[in-house]
Image (cartoon, grey):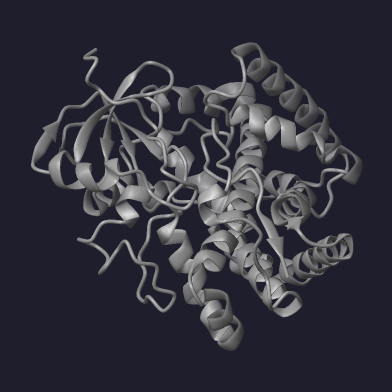
Amino acid sequence: MSENVPAYPFRLPDALSPPSEWAVLRVDEPVAPVRLPSGDQALLLTRYDDVRRVLSDSRFTRHPNGADAARVTANEGGGVFGEKLTEDELHQRWRQVISRAFAPKRVQAMRPRIEKMAESLLTAMIEHGAPADLLGGLGFPLPRWVICDQLGVPETDRDRFTHWSDTMLTMTRFTQAEIDAAQAEFSAYFAAHIAAKRAAPGDDLISEFIRFTDEFDGQLSEEILIGTSQGLLVAGYETTAGMIGKMVALLLAEPGGWARLHAEPGLARTAIEEVLRFDANPGFGVPRYLSAEVRVADRTLPGGTMVVCSLGAANRDDGAFADADRMDLYRTPNPHLAFGIGPHGCVGQALARVELTVVLQVLLRMLPTLELAEPPADLAIRDGLVVGGLERLLVRW
């Protein structure tokens, strides 16, 4: 490996600004070799059209042995859906199950409870007094409560999920032994939790997954249920918590932004979509194994290539968004890629949007004079995890 290959992810100049490499690579080297934390090499895609094309191609998965792994899983213990399935068939059917669990009607029905919890957390933070850490008081506990509530996890067990989530998302924070221990603890916990839900189903996602898959004349394997629970924990807790902090920080750092939102409540929808697009620290990106030859940015990439799709860089592409490096709270349409796209797009994006909307509206109503208690340049980045975020967000009112 050449010593000239840059290390990835790139370092940020500050918590709210993108790495300078994005703009350079989009122009000079949109398919660029990078060195990953593991020491492996991959190709980084930074242009909007290229990232969208690769993510929209159902042939490309996260792992080179994706098809084989899916077939093995599908046939364990009599099969996931009671028949032999290709990876594509298995993926489509499993997405049907998860998509039904996160259908708009179900997500909207959750909104009053999410709003009540947000108000309760914010009331406690206000009573404690300013300055306060908005992430510690609201940003982290709210998504954790939501996803654990959806998974049917008892209140007494929920603090354990923070450690498990951080450990399983690490790139540099924890040793391999610590990661393996967290994986084992998580798997053991959910094996027991799933067994309990099989014996006594409730009004939660695990129970619904079991019920939904019965419609396909089969049973979910424990491995898939544990893997799905892990994915929901990561997506439903860590990424949403991180985005809550970044959303509020970006809006408070924007001159006049908070006052504008307070004066125009209807602006919340487009503002949320814009901060999702504008996020300079979305994390690692989306890896894809090219199982076939593909043409990207006037270059032929052979099958067997591993690429990383940088959603953040793609969302700052002037070829796709006018004045892309300026946050425009009125921007519409806004076809950003913050939740991915295509067959592997985030199935929980409707829930994430509801949580972000609730947080923003509750904050605007309860703390109309909210402001940052430290300069944006001093905001501490939460380094070492696959997803990006802040260590804390000190605010006052």
Q: Residue at x 10, y 37 (%)?
A: 299
- Name the quadrant of the C terminus: bottom right
Q: Is residue 288 visible?
A: yes
Q: Position of residue 231 (x, y in %)?
A: 60, 39
Which sits in the foreground, 359 or 124? 124
Q: Is residue 8 left or right of residue 53?
A: right
- Looking at the rendered image, the quarter that the N terminus falls into is top left
Q: Position of residue 91 (x, y in %)?
A: 47, 41
Q: Is residue 318 toward the left or the right of residue 14 in the image?
A: left
Left or right side of 357 for 129: right
Furthest toward the left, the residue is: 298
- Count of number-bearing discs: 0
Q: Residue sitting at 71 percent across and 30 percent down?
A: 164
Percent x, y for residue 261?
Answer: 56, 80
Q: Is residue 264 above or below residue 162?
A: below
Give me the residue at 22% from left, 53% from top: 49
User: On screen, 363 above or below 320?
Assistant: below
Q: Can residue 215 be seen?
A: no
Find residue 363 and report its horizontal and vertical position in percent: 70, 71
